[in-house]
Amino acid sequence: MKLKLSRPFGNVVVDVKASAAPAAPVQLKKILVPVDFSTCSKKAVQYAVPFARQFKAGILFLYVVPLHFHYSDDEIEVDSDALSSMRQETDASRKLTDLIRELVPDDVAVDAEIRHGVEAAEIVDLARKADTDVIILSTHGRTGRAHSLVGSVAEDVVRLAPCPVLVVRERQHEFVQVQTMPKAITATTL
């Protein structure tokens, strides 16, 4: 691309003919959407659906059952209560089914996974292993003390992800029109 000043001086004219080869069109096949079932994460789903429809891509949902740590004077222990973990996984499975039924139309291919671990690490790991084209996730936009105490999963994912990341904020200018469609779902979907 060439830029040149026009006569009289002051305006810039862009010569598009001289530009390099046109950029390749964007192709998405797999969209990873981590969810925590908050209103904010539902907003990320509402962004993922139009992308999936436009590019005929599938959506891979991920819920991470967070690890709970116990601190003592000289060590850190991971809570490994198997019964609690099974309850959380069962609850997450039910919530994922409900979320998909509520927000994802039938013409969008869906898969879902539940993992246990540190949220950002599990998101990045799945993005790599599943060869994800883009991650669409939400952020609660915490600042100050809340941010320093809780941290930001979205921030860590953006820093470590092997693919582009679209971060959907809780309050922002919308460019996606939200439509909810009821959907019949079978047990084989998850």
Image: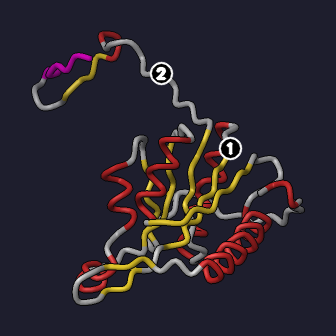
Is 78 inside the magenta-drawn segment?
Answer: no
Q: Answer left or right for 133 relative to 144.
A: right
State the residue at coordinates (85%, 55%).
Answer: 188
Q: Nearer the viewer, residue 181 or 81?
A: 81
> Where does residue 40 sit, x and y in percent of width and height?
53, 73
Q: Which residues are magenta?
A: 1-7
Front position among marks 1 and 2: 1
> Where does residue 58 sit, x and y in percent of width and height?
68, 44
Above-or-below relation of 136 to 93: above
Identify residue for label 1. 58
Query: Mark 1: which amino acid?
Result: Gly
Query: In the rendered image, which quarter contains the C terminus?
Result: bottom right
- Whether residue 147 is visible to the viewer of this picture, yes or no, is yes
Above-or-below relation of 41 to 190: below
- Rendered image: mark on residue 24: 2
SS under mark 1: strand
Q: Answer left or right for 9 relative to 144.
A: left
Query: In the rendered image, which quarter contains the N terminus?
Result: top left
Q: Answer left or right for 116 relative to 94.
A: left
State the residue at coordinates (77%, 67%).
Answer: 97
